[in-house]
Image: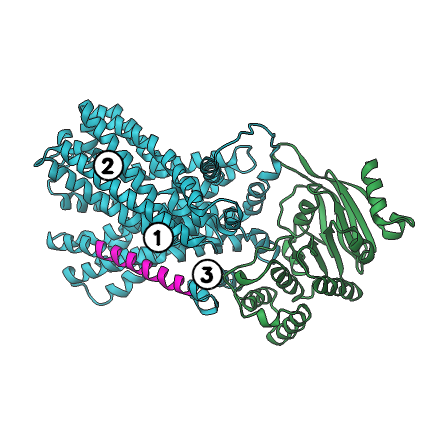
Chain colours: A cyan, B green
Amino acid sequence: MRDGFLLLKTLLLSTSRRNIYRYCRDKKKRRKVVGNAVAMTFLYVMLIAYSLALSCGLGVYGMIDAAPAMCAISVSAIALLFTLFQTNGYLFNFRDYDMLLSLPFKTGTVAACRYLYMYIRDIPWYMCISLAMMIGYGIFARPSVIVYPLWIVLSLFLPIVPSLAAALIGFLVAKLTAGHKKTKLLQTVLMFVFLIACFSSRFFIDSLFRDDKVQETFEKTSAMSGRIAGIYLPAGWFSDAVTRLDIGSILLLVGTAAVLFAAVFSLVGRSYRSINSALKTQGAARRPRLSGQRRRGVVTAIAFKEFRRLTGSTTYMTNAAMGIVLAALLGVVTLVFGFDKIIAVVTKDAPLDAAMLRPAIPFIVYFFIGMVATTACSPSLEGKCFWILQSLPVEMKTVYQGKMLFNMLLTAPFMAFSTLCLCVSAKAPALDTALDLLLGFALCAFSTAWGCVCGVKHIQLDWENEVEVLKQSPAVVIYMLPNMFVVMGLVVLAVFLGTRVDHRLLTLLWTLIASVLALLSYRRVLKLSVRRV
Amino acid sequence: MSGNTILEISHFSKTYGNGRRAADDVSLRVEAGDICGFIGHNGAGKSTTIRAIVGVLDFTEGEITIDGHSVKDEPMACKQITAYIPDNPDLYENLTGIQYLSFVADVFGIDAAERQESIRYYADLFGISDDLGDLISAYSHGMKQKLAIISALIHRPRLMVLDEPFVGLDPKAAFTLKEIMRELCEQGAAVFFSTHVLDVAEKLCNKVAIIKQGRIIAAGTMEEFTEGHSLEETFLEADGDA
């Protein structure tokens, strides 16, 4: 217990921005810490505002009783996904493994601390949602005072069950693949399978209750939350605990989290060393052959290096390639089941048809494609190896051009494939399809260049674990969240304007805007790269 | 088992996924007071053996004991009396030097007065006392190495295991480390370290073991091993014969 506390405290301190600010003598680095804190606060405020608006919406429509269940489901879903993305990197394959294992810590203690460290680092995100929804609930439901501290305390237990489930999945993936020749490929494929299963579960649960005829979206969402809470018991316990002050539910939620924690880490602890040994020595087990040597141009060589970097890390691959895999999947599913059917499932039978949604096709695809731009994280991912690029006889702008070329090569084909699938399924005319493809490419170019602006401006080289860069770095978060929210808005706007203005003209206009923004972002990258030489 | 044996490796083997044996039937014995040099080419199996000794690498074949405790069955007892310095220490970059040392001292349960004395003594010896308040990320490679050495000495280990310890150290620090190794051995501890610097090994070690392609090809006291020749000559000869 003492060892665990000590290790956890040190792990948190070792990545604490406050510690850097306090002890760093480099003023530039200190300013960066402050800038990052401001950027993160802004994003937390955005999330709080979104969650507050959601709970107030429920209150306005008289469905505030559904808020606790909705809060529990949202927090649990985010905890599950966050942890799935982070397990490989935080729990396994971490850099300080040798140092920690050579110290007198039990393997179970190390594993449990790594999990708790991951959990504590994600707590601000969970609490932003939970506290904002609690405020909304407080305004409309006027519960007794005891509900507030109870809500806050139970919110800390809520993410434990889903994140433990995700950690267990990560453990099983690592155990199944450790020692195998193609460990990374297998890990990536298995993680994608689990992640896609998670993303699809919402539709599966929804389809269980398809016979219901609720009209209003809020009512539907509220009713669905109640049903999910019936299936996913911790959400139901949380809801019962705060709405009915049910002691049994409180004990069940806390007890289940504690028992599950003990069970998972007793299991993980047993084979923790053997799994990590196998993962760490995978490189040594390989017998590389010197073949396929080819001369490439500088920009292409950097782009190829980026490809190797991406495929060399399961964590990077699952984070960065999730969007393109989902886009491709969307394309295939739409082609198989039909655009109309997919619209009906996603919008829960809202009065929308294929013709209305056609102008939004490039934005729908871009929602997935633009989810992560490798350019946002790849400058930071250079980490301690940044000196290699700095010492090469190439300008930094060439380096960033190589990184941008790779992101374009990665995203554009998937953008084209998915857009074509959707257009064919929606029976769009050839000219519309061509214009949609054009807009798609412009959006890819914007995502690439804007991602690179964020990546270069908020470059962070002194990380302990690449998950820090991929999931929590200011560059990625500043790129991703506004991008996602704006695209969601653009989908609505494109559908709305598409019914009033000629949609071809509109697509051309969007293409022009995206191209101008891409060009401006590209020029900004060039300026930033000159400053960094 | 001998009461003076600090490290005993018996028939240790480590096989990777593709069937490649990184260590093949390695057997060695290091007694109290020994400084044993572990020599071999890059990729010969030195680091694999060292990582197994310090409990970082899992293994199924053979047995490794430290002061009579099995690394496999009693890892905590082994780690309590062992210090490990890897070739490229991955320390927590965003901790200050003193925060890192305090963490290690806490792990080993060293009381405040003892740790203060120990840290001050070794930090002065290595000349990094004034830098302990800085973040480790600001340290040079050599300073990080010095910090790793100090952290390894805090709990007065019975066995010190070092992987290429002299890489990155300035001449004065290298001399200090050699003195510390000798002092430790005089106090009844043992040192086991890998190196490519044969001159250092020859002057410092009383025992030497050579590993090639995972197998120990020669081991013994320095006198037995060199028989009047230089270690370099003997190493090249043994390496060529094997």
Q: Secondary structure at mark 1?
A: loop
**Badge 3: chain ID:** A
Q: State which chain disc 2 sits on.
A: A
Residue A373 or residue A516, whichever sits in front: A516
Tell me what residue is drawn at x 26 percent, y 26 percent.
Answer: A420
* Residues in magenta, as a range: A30-50
Tell me if mark 2 has few (under 14), some (14-19) or many (20+) residues whose alpha carbon lies within 10 angstroms of its own: many
Label 2 vs 1, first from the N-terminus: 1
Q: Secondary structure at mark 2?
A: helix
Residue at the disc numbered 1: A159
Which numbered tag is attached to residue A12?
3
Left or right of residue A174, residue A361 in this image: left
Give residue A507's position: percent from left, percent from top: 18, 35
Q: Residue at x 32, y 62 (%)?
A: A38
The dot on residue A364 is 2
Name the residue nearer the viewer: A105 or B177: B177
